[in-house]
Image: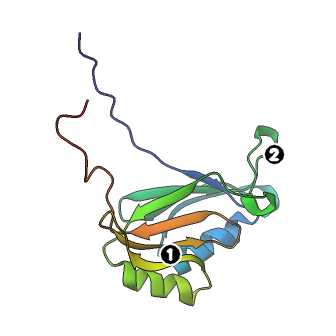
Amino acid sequence: MSATPVVGDVYPSLIYDDAAAAIDWLCRAFGFVRRLVVPGPGGRVEHSELTLGAAVVMVSSPKPETGRISPRGLAGVPQALSLRIDDPDAHYRRARSHGAAILRELRDEDYGSRGYMAKDPEGHLWYFGTYRPGAHWSDAAP
């Protein structure tokens, strides 16, 4: 019996202590476009949707009751977001000019991508490059 393949999309949800400022910065530095912002009391952002091409990232204020906090106070970050872009050189220059902390300079990777890694003001890690996952997958793989 063969299994029916599951089709799904991934929409990362990021927490920022100052979500409104983070949204502004992500749009300026990384080129995201604000599609939806749901405000909450006291300047909170309950939910938002930002796009970069076909990619969607959701940003909100902390939700300590569910354990969702900004990485700002953590000793490390357990994930990084990787986004495929057409022109990593221009993107790198833009991010750097808006104060992105560059963790790995723009370079050609051994696996065929050209890209760089940056950290945003609250500590989320981002990789922007030409790599598209699946480029090395075999058609014979399960």
Under circle 1, the secondary element is: helix
Examine the image and state in which quarter residue 131 appears: bottom left
Please provide percent x and percent y for residue 71: 73, 58
Position of the C terminus by quadrant: top left
Residue shown at 39% from the left, 85% from the top: 90
Residue linked to disc 2: 64
Please provide percent x and percent y for residue 21: 69, 72
Q: Which mark is residue 30?
A: 1
For mark 2, does the 10 Å Cα neighbourhood hold few (<14), some (14 to 19), or many (20 or more) residues? few
| Image position of 52 with respect to 133: above or below | below
| Image position of 57 with respect to 108: above or below | above
- In terms of sequence position, does the residue under pointer 2 or pointer 1 come before the other? 1
Q: Residue furthest top?
A: 1
Please provide percent x and percent y for residue 106: 44, 80
Compare residues 29 and 118 and report the one nearer the observer.
Answer: 118
Q: Kindly identify the amino acid type of the residue bearing the numbered disc 2.
A: Pro
Please provide percent x and percent y for residue 74: 78, 57
Residue shown at 25% from the left, 54% from the top: 135
